[in-house]
Amino acid sequence: MNLKQLAAHLNLSQTTVSRALNGYPEVNEQTRKRVMEAAQALNYAPNARAKGLATGRAMAIGHVIPMSTQHQMMNPVFGDFIAGASDEYVKAGYDMTLSVTGDRDEEENYRRLKAKGNVDGIIVHGPSMKDPRIPFLRQLGLPFVVHGRATELDVPYSWVDVNNTHAFQRATDFLLDLGHRRIALINGLEFMDFAYRRRVGFAQALDGHGLLPDPRYMAAGEMTESYGFEAASRMLALPDRPTAMITSSVIAAIGIRRAIHAAGLEMGRDVSVITHDDDLSFLRNGPDVPIFTATRSSVYEAGRIAAAMLLAHIADPDLPAQPRLLEAQLIIGGSTGPAPQDTH
Amino acid sequence: MNLKQLAAHLNLSQTTVSRALNGYPEVNEQTRKRVMEAAQALNYAPNARAKGLATGRAMAIGHVIPMSTQHQMMNPVFGDFIAGASDEYVKAGYDMTLSVTGDRDEEENYRRLKAKGNVDGIIVHGPSMKDPRIPFLRQLGLPFVVHGRATELDVPYSWVDVNNTHAFQRATDFLLDLGHRRIALINGLEFMDFAYRRRVGFAQALDGHGLLPDPRYMAAGEMTESYGFEAASRMLALPDRPTAMITSSVIAAIGIRRAIHAAGLEMGRDVSVITHDDDLSFLRNGPDVPIFTATRSSVYEAGRIAAAMLLAHIADPDLPAQPRLLEAQLIIGGSTGPAPQDTH
DNA sequence: GCCAGATACCGAAGCGCTTTGGAAACTCCT
DNA sequence: AGGAGTTTCCAAAGCGCTTCGGTATCTGGC
């Protein structure tokens, strides 16, 4: 069933039917009603490709998710982000298309995306500190919003990000206030912007108390359970082991918890743990009482916001670049407690 | 840059340029080379919408992921499945579009997807035992492949699924052979087909040893960490607590591990645990030595297979429906051991 | 009763591509 | 040299939609 057939069926011109369906004023309300009902009854939906060709708009947003070829890992945060974004797209009648790309020939990839013309805008995931995609996309002239930031870049662009620095500074301060002095940071890969910023916040808090980060208490890696386990185990084996640990993901925190138990210690008493919590739907940090003390910020919500922002940019290309900083909430769970008396 | 401009630039007709680009034989090899080079140099890529309109093929696959409105949860398995599927799509030049749908008006959703014409086929995720989407899609005439199965449906369709029944039967047998008799099943939601089948396999193994499933040792729910924790805690508090547990996801298993520790017991000694392991990239079951004994089957691989199957169906619509059963591997980790002496 | 201005509709062009149905130009054979 | 057969190219139609530039018909004011 296409427009032509529907028009013939109604004894109207394609023009009128098209206008009726798209809410143009120059069509009689009765006619419009008749058209609408027929469309409904006959299961007519305009062909998206034809519509796109005619209007020049694809009514679709592209999400480009980098899947590093070395660390063949899909970021677990992605699903929830997508779900949030999708909510906004559905409301606005947009579709969502995904490209999972290796890290090579990214540019070529974006260029094709634009040339092929099947997206009106792009969401960029997982930016590194000096992400080359950002200046490139600016120059390409395709609207985009970044989930995260690129610290070392000094060009304007729209982004949605958690205040990672502040969150980790606050978390570290919280531990310092509890009397902890040997605090470890079990971080994500530090060329990723979020991980870099978290380390900065961590270091700032230590500095505020006249302390310096101890390299023996620092780790950076892909945030898996076993990474958390191994990093924590290594540190717990030190003669002057840390009394507290901060980590970047609940999954790593679970590995840390395992390491603490394996060392015959108890989390929250012998070793305090704070994690960042993206509030993932399948990895809730406890039902009501949180398991881990955490800096929490919903990535689902970030998805919604980023999507809404991108749609706004598409609707009005002259909109200036917008930053959007989300503050993480510090929620107190059972994984933190006062620093134990000196364990030397 | 479009075909017309490219053709003008080359002093050729659109026809010839189009043919050169698409590898038709009736064009001089030198001309083709010239065209290819110009296209490369000028960053020409055919407009996907126009191409789609002209050819009637969208060169895109739709993934419809149900996000139940009650349990607002994104299946963590999804990311890896998508990554696997994407590999195949990229090779074949297909795009991937996502729709996250609530569980209401699903049918309307599929119908629009077809009418709008921006996908050539669909992957169906998370089927229930008598999933109405399957007969509906058959009747719609849009090629599709199901990730999973619908046990109670007796119509032919293509699917890719793990042999859940066999996997759980084998896991249960393994525990029985270790001397366990009080074995718990901490399952997923049992209207989901995979969870139902796993329960069947579990029951079959018990039956093979003349045992009956004990309702006190059975739980079904959304597979989160805290669900695993709570279900396990409840069971461990029983006077005759189970000595072994089987669960459907690593995340739930982690909650179970926590419950075992919280009860002052040790996993693998006091309580054995076997989990199903989808081999998710961000949730690897230990780096080399597996943490949990598990029935393992890569969901990434399932994504590849499902995608390839769908592409084959699109290429040849007369292809008969194909089932594809993947056997899970039983891998032995540290979470299982012989049944402890009677703990009454 | 006539005309300006709404109102309600329509024809046809055009979006960028593929593809049908030729048509030149060239090769080869007799 | 003349035609059959190849090779290489092209003009134009068509995919399903939107939208520009009309054209009838109706209304109201004088």
Image: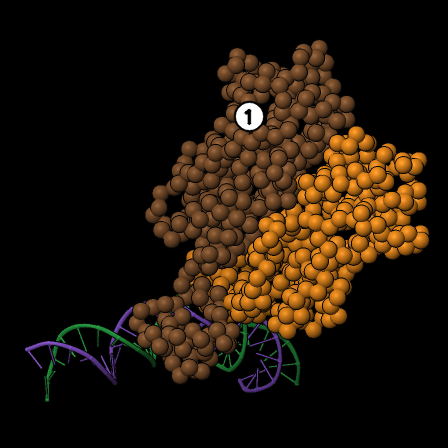
Chain colours: A orange, B brown, C purple, D green
Q: For this rendering, which residue is in front, B297 or A2?
A: B297
Identify the residue shown where x is 89% and y is 35%. Answer: A343
Q: Is residue B64 visible?
A: no
Q: Residue at x 61, y 51 (%)?
A: A71
Q: Quick one: label 1, few (<14), some, or many (20+) residues within 10 Å?
A: many
Q: Residue placed farthest to the front in the image?
A: A239
The vertical placement of D19 against B75, above or below, is below
Asked if residue B241 lies left or right of residue B281, the reply is right
**Subunit of mark 1?**
B
The vertical placement of A159 against A205, above or below, is below
Is residue A144 shown left or right of residue A238? left
Report if residue B253 is visible in the image: yes
Q: Is residue C23 left or right of residue A168?
A: left
Residue where numbered disc 1 is placed = B171
Q: Nearer the viewer, residue A227 or A310?
A: A227
The kind of residue on which mark 1 rests is Ala
Up the image or down, A152 lies above or below C27; here it is above
Q: Position of residue D16 (x, y in %)?
A: 45, 63
Q: Nearer the viewer, residue A119 or D20?
A: A119
Quarter of the figure with residue A89: bottom right
Q: Position of residue C15 (x, y in %)?
A: 49, 74
Q: How many marks?
A: 1
Q: Taking B60 as reference, is B27 left or right?
A: left
* Rendered location of residue B180, percent (x, y): 61, 17
Secondary structure, mark 1, is helix
Tell me the quarter of the image containing the C terminus of chain B: top right
Residue drawn at 43 percent across, 41 percent down: B158
Residue A28 at what x, y percent from top left?
Answer: 56, 65
Q: Quadrant of residue A5?
A: bottom left
In front of the other: A187 or A342: A342
